[in-house]
Image (cartoon, grey):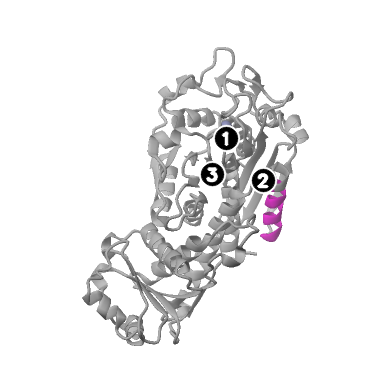
Amino acid sequence: MHKDTTVVLSKTMISAGSSVLAALSEDGLKISGALKVVDGMSGNAVSLAVKNGFKAEKGELKMLYPAGKLHAVLLLGLGKRAELKQDQFIDGVADGAKAARSAGITELHVLADSFGVEDSIRGITLGSMLGTHRFMKYKTKDLAKVKNLGKITIMAEDPAKQQKAFDEAKIVADAVKKTRDMVNTPPNVAGTEEVAQYAKKIAAENRLKCTLLEEKDMEKLGMGCITAVGKGSAAKPKIAILEYNGGAGKPVLLVGKGVTFDSGGYNLKPTNYINNMKDDKAGAITMLHVIEAVARLGVKANVVAAVALAENMVSGMAYRPDDILKAYNGMTVEVTNTDAEGRLVLADTLAYSVEKHKPQAVVDIATLTGATMIALGHFTTPIVGTDEKLIGQLKEAADATGEKVWQLPLWEEYGEAMKSDVADLKNSTDGPDAGVITGAMFLKNFVGEAPWAHLDIGTTVWSKADKGAKQKGATGVCVRTLIEFVKNWK
Ligand SMILES: [Zn+2]
């Protein structure tokens, strides 16, 4: 079986035969300290590389096989220190680790230009863990031939001082890795029941309260939207609610969309759009790992995660266009497109959990629309909401982690498009205009008075490239932002 790279923190010590990755910034290209030791052990390979033109420009990567005692030295350029963003640092280290792995190196020592020691430790930890992570659970052939970087040792002058930053970064990286793995897990393995059991396991391991609403509970409660979406599948809809009590006062409520497979329903998705629809559960999986990380970090806040699980399928029982549904809050919804199911499962989950937990703030995350791609492309997540302060806090958290979010407006005028002739609302507009915003306008009807923000990861959930800290497949986007947001919550 394939094993992930082990990442440890240790005192700077380089022995003969080692391979070293040195991350260097352009304006600090002095060969001193540990780098001087590396230079000495490598027959001055580092100084020679600098003399021969290595400038440590951003993205510059030089692999050396020196004549001295070391096996390999990889020089990684980070560019100018003042311009370096945390995500670029993480991606640089990740690319360095990937290059080492491709070269057949099985053990790597990483040495950082200490541009803010703790940020360096965090960046190297995240870059090492996320860059080397792969989803190989279902590969059975030729595993012995797969190049594997077994161990990365992050070298620190005084590891005791940096242990905390390292431990925290590891918890965060684990949350991202687990999110990627679970989102990548196919729908025949991770259906609504399996994800619900997974949520229970997370709760048990972290001493969180866990409540599971089954289909019959939801019917009794009058949740006509999520139950309709789940009707066509043998995998019954569920809502899992996890509660973490780390502080005082009303909780922050985190809501996630977990459609374990989205066929589109009777508005069936065509080929090329139906593939990868296992990623439609990413919002739920994200929130499960955010609350887990928050618990593991011992954050002083109260947090509730409510995740809506359903599978959107076609059958004689499935809901149809023209159906009129009644949501938990009493509003009626005309179904104009069965592929706009995410907002339906969220409508009941939001209305119910807001009423039950009376949160200080609500944040939801969902692969809600494909319109995200037209709006902002592949690496920026749109954010919308009712409260500028809350949105500001989320933007700050995103900035700190290097993830990219961008606010779109939620002006009242956009609500017109969601009005139905025969019910209070319709679930889909007639055209493609402002799809991210009109989707959010629909959700706004179900969040009550609490400050609310919505992240639409319809496009950023998935990477087509194996580059930097990303692999092909699920990205685990916004996990880091949301952990940072809860950590800083006041
Ligand atoms: Zn859909």
Q: Can residue 144 be found in the magenta stretch? A: no
For disc 2, the marked residue is 241
Query: Camera-side residue: 146 or 238?
Result: 146
Identify the residue shown where x is 57% and y is 29%. 269
Q: Secondary structure at mark 3?
A: loop
The circle drawn on residue 406 is: none
Question: Between marks 2 and 3, how big is the CA–CA gap?
Answer: 17 Å
Question: Between marks 1 and 2, how big is the CA–CA gap?
Answer: 29 Å
Rendered position, 122 above or below 258: below
Q: Earlier in the sequence, mark 1 or mark 2?
A: 2
Q: Name, please, the residue furthest toward the right.
A: 216
Q: Earlier in the sequence, mark 2 or mark 3?
A: 2
Q: In the rendered image, is residue 226 in sight?
A: yes
Q: Quadrant of the N terminus?
A: bottom right
Query: Camera-side residue: 64 or 352?
Result: 64
Which callout, 1 or 3, points to the residue nearer the camera? Answer: 1
Q: Earlier in the sequence, mark 1 or mark 3?
A: 1
For disc 1, the marked residue is 274
Residue 206 is situated, as x and y percent measured from the top left of the image, at: 66, 60
Amino acid at the residue labelled 2: Ile
Question: Between marks 1 and 3, how big is the CA–CA gap?
Answer: 37 Å
Query: Camera-side residue: 487 or 479?
Result: 479
Which callout, 2 or 3, points to the residue nearer the camera? Answer: 2
Please state the extent of the stretch shown in magenta in the rendering: 195-206
Q: Is residue 439 left or right of 355 when viewed as pictured?
A: left
Q: Can residue 200 be found in the magenta stretch? A: yes
The circle drawn on residue 360 is: 3
Identify the residue shown where x is 47% and y is 61%. 131
Q: Is mark 3 within 8 Å of ligand 1?
A: no
Q: Is residue 111 left or right of 300 when viewed as pictured?
A: left
